[in-house]
Each structure stands twice: as structure tokens, then as C-alpha cells.
Image (cartoon, rainbow, N blue to C red):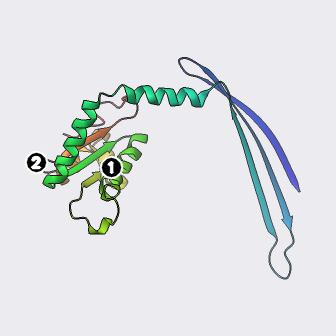
């Protein structure tokens, strides 16, 4: 039997608090002879323990709460009205985002096209038409490679978009340069 133990510590700082993440792991491997003519079996176990100190989770939850509380209800109501209106008139809702926001764009497109149908979804006729522009990796990288990253969404809109369609752009950080979210 082979046993290896190690421990590491990583520190980082936010604007208000310092954090320390301690990780301890064990790795063991045991080779057992299997009965008959079967090859030996390798059993691997990996155990991680994480201890987060100084209230990282509490501060994260508070920051999310503050962010959501800062969005005026009228803005949410206006967005919901825009999306519902698009659904009623059969318009397509295009959703775009970079990095982690690309995953948010995919998730929103999925929720609009599937989750909003509720129970017995196959019986519903009034459906959202939603497309994540972040999902076609081959097309995005072709445009980025041949024409520049700033065209990965705008060229898709030129192919797929129609008058009165809706574009939703997501940015978790708000730091994406406008040229990267160019969908005109």
C-alpha cells in the first residue's frame, strides 16, 4: 500500500477581508490480486478536506444580496415585459456573454425554451424562441480567427436575426469591452 499525505495553504484578499483556504489530501493505492485470470485491480481513494476561515461564505452571500437589492424592480419588470412581448409575437431572443457569462447565456436560453413550459411541456404551443449565441463554439472561433473576436456575436445576428428580435447581453463582471460584445 502506498500512502501520501500533503497539506497546502492558499491566501487571498478581498476589499474588506482576508481569507485563508487550507486543503489536506490523502492519496492511497492498493493493488489486489483478483481471483482467476483477471488482471490486478487498482483501488484509488482520494480525500480532500477544505476549511474556509473568516466568513468567506457569509461575505459572498451578503455581496450577492446587495447586488440583487440594488436592481430596481422596474428594471426587472421591463425586462420581463420585453421577453414576454417577444414570445407573444414569435420573435427570437438572442443571448450573448463571454466567459462565465457564456454559461449564463446558455442557461437562460434553456430556461426560456424549456423551463417556462412548466408541466406537460409537449402540449404547449406558445413558446419562447431563445438562442444562446455563445453555444456554437465552432462558429464563434471561426469568426474570431478569420475576422476578429469582436465579430463573434454580430455576424451570428446578421445570419439569424430579424427585425423586432431581442438581444440580451450578460456580463457578470461588467468588464467585457464593448467591442467584444458587439452585436450590431
Residue that label 2 marks: 163
Q: Residue at x 25, y 42 (%)?
A: 80
Disc 1 is placed on an element classified as helix
Residue 100 located left or right of residue 77: right
Q: Position of residue 154 (x, y in %)?
A: 22, 44
Residue that label 1 marks: 140
Residue nearer the viewer, 105 or 72? 72
Residue farthest toward the front in the current orientation of the protein? 119
Q: Which residue is drawn at 41% across and 27% down?
A: 67
Residue farthest toward the right in the current orientation of the protein? 1
- Badge 1: how crowded within 10 Å, few (<14), some, or many (20+)? some
Please, is residue 173 above or below residue 88 in the view? above
Residue 171 located left or right of residue 87: right
Quarter of the image for residue 55 reads top right
Please, is residue 110 above or below residue 70 in the view? below
Disc nearest the viewer among 2 and 1? 2
Quarter of the image for residue 177 reads top left
Quadrant of the frame with the N terminus = bottom right
Q: Where is residue 26 in the image (x, y as percent from the top left)?
A: 79, 46
Q: Residue at x 77, y 55 (%)?
A: 45
Amino acid at each position: 500500500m502506498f500512502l501520501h499525505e500533503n497539506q497546502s495553504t492558499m491566501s487571498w484578499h478581498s476589499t474588506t477581508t482576508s481569507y485563508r483556504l487550507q486543503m489536506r489530501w490523502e492519496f492511497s493505492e492498493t493493488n489486489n490480486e483478483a481471483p482467476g485470470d483477471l488482471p490486478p485491480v487498482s483501488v484509488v481513494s482520494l480525500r480532500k478536506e477544505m476549511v474556509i476561515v473568516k466568513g468567506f461564505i457569509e461575505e459572498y452571500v451578503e455581496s450577492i444580496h446587495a447586488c440583487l437589492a440594488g436592481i430596481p424592480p422596474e428594471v426587472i419588470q421591463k425586462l420581463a415585459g420585453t421577453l414576454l412581448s417577444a414570445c407573444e409575437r414569435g420573435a427570437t431572443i438572442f443571448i450573448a456573454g463571454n466567459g462565465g457569462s457564456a454559461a449564463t447565456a446558455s442557461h437562460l436560453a434553456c430556461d426560456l425554451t424549456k423551463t417556462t413550459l412548466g408541466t406537460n411541456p409537449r402540449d404547449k404551443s406558445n413558446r419562447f424562441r431563445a438562442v444562446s449565441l455563445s453555444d456554437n463554439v465552432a462558429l464563434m472561433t471561426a469568426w474570431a480567427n478569420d475576422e476578429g473576436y469582436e465579430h463573434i456575436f454580430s455576424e451570428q445576428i446578421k445570419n439569424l436575426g430579424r427585425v423586432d428580435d431581442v438581444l440580451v447581453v450578460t456580463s457578470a463582471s461588467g468588464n467585457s469591452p464593448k467591442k467584444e460584445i458587439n452585436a450590431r
